[in-house]
């Protein structure tokens, strides 16, 4: 099996993104400058601009990297073993846990996510679409096996994801942090029951 080896430019971009993410956690994404990132890497700001056209592009790269990690974990669950209900529950609760670790406990990094959501960065919709597709794969599998009632899997997946948004959306997770009336497990119980109900 051939494994793609990153070239030097790709490695340099990764180093810049890693350094930027560390600084975002330490001093905040708004306060971090290209000069700060360059200094952390022992290079000039001009060298940073060889790989990223702007600070905004770096912001997006840091956010995208965090989203890729969540997507990779979700994909492993969606294609893994277990019943459709078990995988659906694991995908949502893993998403919730990873977002809590990255964005709720890391309040400075949360500023970046808040900006991404408020400003409708395209990568946010792309991320939601990817998670929806993975949920749809699980739901479709459950429908084919008879575990879930036959229906439109893509539509059902969007409804499940929307129902669980409060537990997966970093901004809502912070806003509703003190609300303990409902848990993601309770919401998933409700969604799985609805998926199993005859049409």
Image (spheres, grey):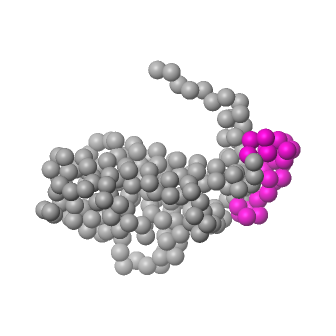
| Image location of residue 181, percent across then percent down | 36, 79
Res. 151 image quadrant? bottom left
Return the residue found at the far left.
Answer: 198
Return the residue found at the far top.
Answer: 1
Check if residue 51 falls in the magenta segment: yes
Q: Using the rendered image of the protein, determine whether residue 110 is visible from the camera's viewpoint.
A: no
Check if residue 174 falls in the magenta segment: no
| Image location of residue 113, percent across then percent down | 59, 63
Residue depicted at x 67% and y 28%: 7
Q: Using the rendered image of the protein, determine whether residue 38 is visible from the camera's viewpoint.
A: yes
| Above or below: residue 180 compared with residue 13 | below
Residue depicted at x 39% and y 55%: 132
| Image location of residue 8, percent across then percent down | 71, 30
Q: In this view, does 15 lie to the left or right of 162?
A: right
Residue depicted at x 41% and y 49%: 74
Q: Give the range drawn in magenta.
A: 27-52
Q: Is residue 3 left or right of residue 26?
A: left
| Above or below: residue 102 compared with residue 74 | below
| Count of picture labels | 0
| Image location of residue 59, percent across then percent down | 67, 55
| Above or below: residue 125 compared with residue 69 | below
Residue toward you, 153 or 48: 153
């Amino acid at each position: 099996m051939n494994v793609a080896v990153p070239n030097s430019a790709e490695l340099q971009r990764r180093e810049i993104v890693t350094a930027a993410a560390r600084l975002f956690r330490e001093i905040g994404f708004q306060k971090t400058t290209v000069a700060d990132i360059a200094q952390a890497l022992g290079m000039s700001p001009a060298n940073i601009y060889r790989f990223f056209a702007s600070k905004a592009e770096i912001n997006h790269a840091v956010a995208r990297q965090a989203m890729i990690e969540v997507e990779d974990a979700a994909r492993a669950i969606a294609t893994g073993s277990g019943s459709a209900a078990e995988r659906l529950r694991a995908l949502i609760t893993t998403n919730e846990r990873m977002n809590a670790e990255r964005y709720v406990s890391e309040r400075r990094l949360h500023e970046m996510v808040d900006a991404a959501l408020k400003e409708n960065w395209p990568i946010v919709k792309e991320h939601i679409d990817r998670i929806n597709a993975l949920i749809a794969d699980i739901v479709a599998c459950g429908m084919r096996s008879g575990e879930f009632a036959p229906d439109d899997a893509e539509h059902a997946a969007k409804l499940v994801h929307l129902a669980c948004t409060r537990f997966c959306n970093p901004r809502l997770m912070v806003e509703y942090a003190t609300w303990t009336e409902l848990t993601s497990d309770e919401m998933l119980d409700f969604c799985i029951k609805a998926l199993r109900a005859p049409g």
